[in-house]
Amino acid sequence: GMSRSSFYNKIKALTNCSPSEFVRQIRMKEATILLKSQRYTIAEVSDLLGYGDPKYFTDIFKKHYGMTPSAYMKQEKK
């Protein structure tokens, strides 16, 4: 019941980011939860979050948090 441009504008007004960026932020928050649990490998986390390629997931994670998922997991072990 809403046009694509109306949807974009509404999400942009509510979150101050595009719909794709909003979804990426949610995925990255979930990634940190899964990585902190230390129950999954990086490839499994990538797959659970819907990223087909673990390397792409690693690149996105690094852009978002400034460190690789493996570095994040090592940091959480301490």
Image: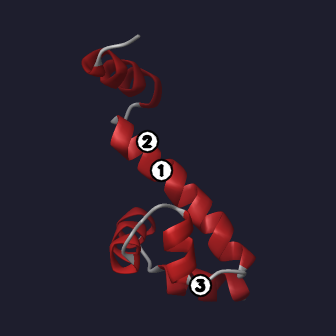
How packed mark 1 is, by other alpha carbons closer than 10 Å (few <14, some 14-19, many 20 or more), is some
Rendering coords of residue 71 (x, y %): 52, 86
Rendering coords of residue 43 (x, y %): 50, 81
* Kind of residue sitting beneath label 3: Thr
Q: Residue at x 53, y 81 (%)?
A: 42
* Kind of residue sitting beneath label 2: Phe
| Residue 4 placement, left or right of 45 | left
Find disc 2 in the rendering and name its residue: 22
Find disc 1 in the rendering and name its residue: 25
Above or below for 66 versus 39: above
Residue 65 is tagged as none
Find disc 3 in the rendering and name its residue: 41
Above or below for 1 versus 73: above
Above or below for 42 versus 8: below
Secondary element at image label 1: helix
Above or below for 48 versus 68: above
Query: Looking at the image, how many numbered discs can be counted on the residues?
Result: 3
Name of the residue lying farthest toward the left: 5
In contact (CB < 8 Å): disc 2 and disc 1: yes
